[in-house]
Amino acid sequence: MAEIILKNISKKFKEEEVVKNLNVTIRDGSFTVLVGPSGCGKSTTLRMIAGLEQQSSGDIWIGDECVNDLPPGKRNIAMVFQNYALYPTMTVRGNIEFGLKNKKVPKKEREILIREISEIVGLTDYLDKKPNKLSGGQRQRVALARAMVKKPKVFILDEPLSNLDAKLRSQMRSELIQLHKKLGTTFVYVTHDQVEAMSMGDEIAILNKGTIQQMGSPMNVYHEPNNIFTAEFIGTPAMNIFEYNKVKDHLSNLSRKVKFVGFRPEHALLALTEKEKDAGYLKLASEIITMETLGAETIYTVKNEAGVMHIKSFIPPFENAKELLVSIPYEKLYFFDQEGKRYRSVSTRQMDTALAGGA
Amino acid sequence: MNTTIPYKLLNGIGILIVVSIFAFPFVWMISTSFKSLGETMIFPPAWLPESLHWENFTAAWNSGPFLTYFKNSIFVSISILILQFLTIIPAAYAFARYQFKGNKFFFALTMITLMIPAQLIFLPVYLQFSAWGLLDTLWALILPFASSAFGIFLLRQSFKQVPEELLEAARLDGASEWKIILKIMIPIAKPVLITFGLFSFITHWNDYFWPLVMTTSDVTRTLPLGIAKLREVEGGVAWHILMAGNMILVIPILIVFFFAQRQIIRAFVYTGIK
């Protein structure tokens, strides 16, 4: 068990800087997910922690040890790879045993460890099979067993579920969460899938273009995005964001710094006609483009003066409607400045009076 | 796949023709090695000997110091094989897996040596070995073949196919580079190594030219030279003895091939690791 600290970490490949001056503390025992679009530097960061890639500058601490010059095998880390990277010529037992043999663990102890681990991951009957005789899920379990058996201080997982089919993926997802609870070890998990990040992590770090956009608990990141990138990256459908100019008529008197306005798809209320004058809402008369009925919820794609937006609604679908009134409570609006940074100094109360006075 | 009867028939006949062309000299050698001297001369030729003349083999074996030839051949071929494995495996691993200055240049240099025939360089090698006093020793037969450009090339290609993650996983498992070579690379490349080993063994087992140039005495000569000497019997070539000698030469190869066959087929149909 250990905390991981990255201090001023940068990584250059030739002239291209893929990770820029990263400062992150990964809490001891946390399940931290690094998430971001492809090419954002998340895998590179992970590989630098593992020691498979040398950082161009900065320090990496695992526990109370600076691991800058330690080779991967000495960092007390176990890694699970996207394509499992099982040794094809060894049996399942051989795969699990390899790291222990290199650590010179005596044979008797190895056997006990392997027996324990294979029971945990349910591989006892497959110990003498070669990886190519196993299914995807079983291979994944071998990879996990191989990592776990070393009792590492830190687990790092590089998109471990992306080769599995949807059903197996959600199953493995919950197994991984349980595993983390059972082991209590620090997990660092890389994925490009924000759903995976939200559902598994107790801490999420969102990366883009080599820098951390935001770090926090899933709910914190979801409800309090620091910038447009985070706001749009987390959540499906993504947050609706449009230029302030397009809705200026409805939302006057805002600070000049505000350039963009956004809201979450599920925060909008839908109605066929406008009811009484209920203040405190941004109201947009919209035309329905498509309607996806998913059973519990319905996702509308609508068009209005602000542009095209997605609305998630939990009330029964408006079957034959062509037009809808979309109302968004003021307190659910997010404001961003020119650079896409969150603009927080708009308080809802201030807005209410301003708008009431304006209208 | 066309499975009509005429197609199958044609296919079968085609295969039969090709097989006969390849197998005939071999079958003829076996048949002749069991004939009497008379049977080798008659026309039309006798396809099969009337009785099996096993004494041809003892005659061939006893016509010279065949035990020495045999031992020399075994020693030379196996020493070459061992040395080649010791040199080509690390070389191929370095060429396939390390980025160092001159990687491409040295690999190209290695490939160029493939294009130079032995007949071109035997003279300088001969002079060099003469200066070192190695002529007419088994070293002269072994050392020039201690490495193999062909082997490096073959193995490098096969090492290159191993996914990088596998090596990274091994490094995280605390394996040294040597351990990675021994426990991961070699087992994966086993079919290729066996195939190369067989080619190398056959080549040097059958090699006639190099031992002929480098050795002068019976103590250091190898089987092919001994067999060739069987032709120098006075009063015409004793074909049945010569063929018996050839059988002695070929049988070890057949045995090796028999055991390595499955691996060789795997080496050629091997499509990499999932």
Image (spheres, grey):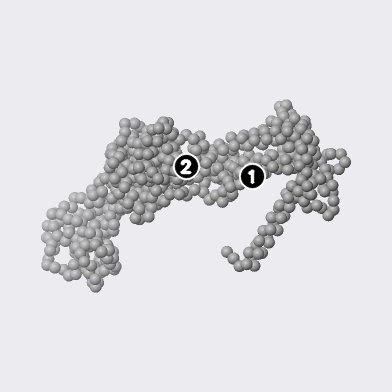
Residue lying farthest to the right in this orientation:
B235
Q: Secondary structure at mark 1?
A: helix
Badge 2 crowding class, 10 Å Cα cut-off, few under 14, some 14 to 19, many 20 or more, is many
Q: Nearer the viewer, mark 2 or mark 1?
A: 1
Measured along the vertical axis of the image, is residue A246 above or below residue B92?
Answer: below
Query: Which residue sits at x=37%, y=35%?
Result: A112
The outermost residue toward the front is: B51
In the rendered image, which residue does mark 2 sit on?
A90
Q: Do we see residue A16 in this rendering?
A: no
Seen in the picture, residue B131 relative to A312 is either above or below; the reply is above
Locate residue B257, reporting x and y percent: 64, 44
Q: Viewed as shown, does residue A16 lie left or right of A177? A: right
A12 left or right, relative to A339? right
Q: Quadrant of the N terminus of chain B?
A: bottom right
Q: Quick check: do tags 2 and 1 share a chain? A: no
| Residue type, mark 1 in image | Phe
Q: Which of the 4 quarters of the picture holds residue A293?
A: bottom left
- The chain to which mark 1 is attached is B
Tell me if A252 is positioned left or right of B118 in this view: left
Between B115 and B257, the one lying in front of the other is: B257
User: How far apart, in angstroms, are the residues tagged by discs 2 and 1?
Assistant: 26 Å
Q: Residue at x 76, y 42 (%)?
A: B54
Q: Amino acid at mark 2?
A: Met
Which numbered dot is residue B257? 1
Left or right, A185 with respect to B165, comes to left
- Which chain hosts label 2? A
Provide the secondary structure element on which disc 2 rests.
loop
Q: Locate residue A254, reporting x and y percent.
A: 19, 56
